[in-house]
Image (cartoon, grey):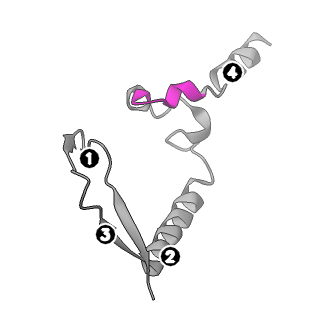
C-alpha cells in the first residue's frame, strides 16, 4: 500500500514546477502524464496537429507584421529567442 501512496505523490500536479524557467531543469521523464518515452501523453500528437491547423488558419486569415515600436533583443539558449518576446500586429485580410 505504501508504494501506491508514493506513486500518487510523485504524480501530483504542482503548477509551480512550471513557473518561469524551472521546466528547463526538469528531466523529461519526471512528470508522468506528459513525459517522454513510451508512456508520453496519448493526445500529444493530436494536440500538435491541432496547433498546426490553428496557426495555418490564423496566417491564412490575417496579415501579420512586426510592431515597429518594439525593439527585439536576442537571447541565446539552446535556440535563439527574443528576450522580451516579439510584438506583432494582425490585420484581417480582405
Q: Which residue is mark 2?
A: 57
Residue at the extreme front of the image, as rendered: 69
**Are circles 2 and 1 on residues that touch, CB within 8 Å?**
no
The residue tagged 4 is 7
Residue bearing mark 3: 65
| In contact (CB < 8 Å): disc 3 and disc 4 | no
- Classify mark 4: residues with Cα within 10 Å, few (<14), some (14-19) or many (20+): few
Distance in Å between CA atoms under marks 2 and 1: 24 Å
Instruction: Indicate yes or no whether the magenta region holds residue 51.
Output: no
Instruction: For label 3, count other residues whose C-alpha is less than 10 Å away and answer few (under 14), some (14-19) or many (20+).
Output: few
| Residue drawn where x is 41% and y is 70% of the image | 90
Residue 10 location in percent, x, y?
Answer: 63, 21
Q: In the rendered structure, are the residues bearing label 2 and label 3 in contact, judged by CB atoms less than 8 Å apart?
A: no
Contact? badges 1 and 4 (CB < 8 Å): no
Residue 79 against residue 18 in the figure, above or below? below
Q: Which tag, 3 or 4, sits closer to the chain's start?
A: 4
Residue beneath the point at 56% across and 53% down: 44
Q: Secondary structure at mark 1?
A: strand
- Classify residue 64 by image quadrant: bottom left
Q: Which residue is mark 1?
A: 81
Quote the CA–CA distance across marks 2 and 3: 16 Å
Residue 26 in percent (x, y) is at 44, 27
Disc number lying in front (2 or 3): 3
Q: Is residue 11 left or right of residue 52?
A: right
Question: Of the residues tagged 3 and 1, which is closer to the observer?
Answer: 3
Q: CA distance from mark 1 to mark 4?
A: 37 Å
Q: Which callout, 2 or 3, points at the residue further toward the start of the chain?
A: 2
Dot 3 or dot 1, earlier in sequence: 3
In the rendered structure, which segment of residues is drawn in magenta? 15-22
Amino acid at each position: 500500500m505504501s508504494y501506491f501512496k508514493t506513486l500518487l505523490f510523485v504524480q501530483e500536479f504542482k503548477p509551480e514546477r512550471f513557473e518561469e524557467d524551472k521546466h528547463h531543469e526538469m528531466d523529461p521523464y519526471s512528470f508522468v502524464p506528459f513525459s517522454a518515452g513510451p508512456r508520453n501523453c496519448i493526445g500529444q500528437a493530436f494536440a500538435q496537429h491541432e496547433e498546426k491547423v490553428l496557426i495555418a488558419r490564423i496566417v491564412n486569415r490575417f496579415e501579420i507584421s512586426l510592431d515597429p515600436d518594439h525593439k527585439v533583443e536576442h537571447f541565446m539558449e539552446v535556440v535563439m529567442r527574443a528576450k522580451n518576446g516579439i510584438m506583432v500586429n494582425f490585420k484581417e485580410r480582405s
